[in-house]
Image (tube, rainbow, N blue to C red):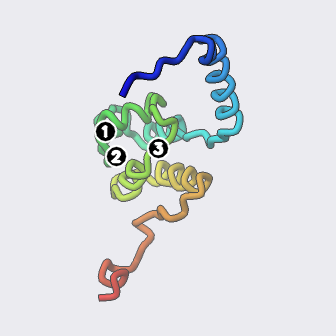
Amino acid sequence: MGKKTVSCEQRPSLTARLETVRYLGEIKSSSDVRRPVPFLQIAEALVEAGYRSLDAQAKALGIHRSTAWTIIKAKHKLGRLHTKTTQKILENPETPLTVRAVVLRYLAERGESRLEDPQHHSRSPSDRTGV
């Protein structure tokens, strides 16, 4: 049960490890093709629809004020909209049609066709469950 000691000769230098990390980061960033999130388009559509204050914008989107702020200011840490956020926006009846169109276009570009606009469904929940 003795500890194994690793000599400094067996481990790569700090510089070599940093170079490896940077190289792997470059590979990931060059292969990681992401679709730009239409944060600016959502913000513009809200303002054009008359929602100028952050509180009004959050209510129009059906999301929390802090989430609305990250969208409006384009400061979202993921660089994309979370699935639950897009669902909340689409499920909210107060969401302006222009914003709804931007979000649906974004989802289509991301290939998330499983998220459809709930306002376009005419079936009742009992029809979907087979009851």
Label located before the other in sequence (2 or 3): 2
Residue linked to disc 2? 60
**Label 2 close to label 1 by CB (< 8 Å):** yes
Please, what is the three-letter code of the amino acid marked with disc 1?
Ala
Q: Residues within 10 Å of mark 3 (few under 14, many from 20)?
A: some
Q: Residues within 10 Å of mark 2 (few under 14, many from 20)?
A: many
* Residue at the image position 45 percent from the left and 32 percent from the top: 77
In the displayed structure, would residue 89 be above or below residue 27? below
In space, the residues marked 2 and 3 are separated at their CA atoms by: 16 Å
Give coordinates of residue 94: x percent, y percent: 34, 53
Quarter occupied by the N terminus: top left
Residue linked to disc 1? 56
Please, what is the three-letter code of the amino acid marked with disc 2?
Ala
SS under mark 2 = helix
**Label 1 close to label 3 by CB (< 8 Å):** no
Residue linked to disc 3? 81
In the displayed structure, does residue 99 sit left or right of residue 93?
right
Give coordinates of residue 84: x percent, y percent: 38, 51
In the displayed structure, would residue 95 be above or below residue 38? below
Q: Nearer the viewer, residue 55 or 124?
A: 124
* Residue at the image position 36 percent from the left and 46 percent from the top: 61
Give coordinates of residue 58: x percent, y percent: 32, 40
In the displayed structure, does residue 55 sit left or right of residue 102?
left
SS under mark 3 = loop
Give coordinates of residue 55: x percent, y percent: 28, 35
Please, what is the three-letter code of the amino acid marked with disc 3?
Leu
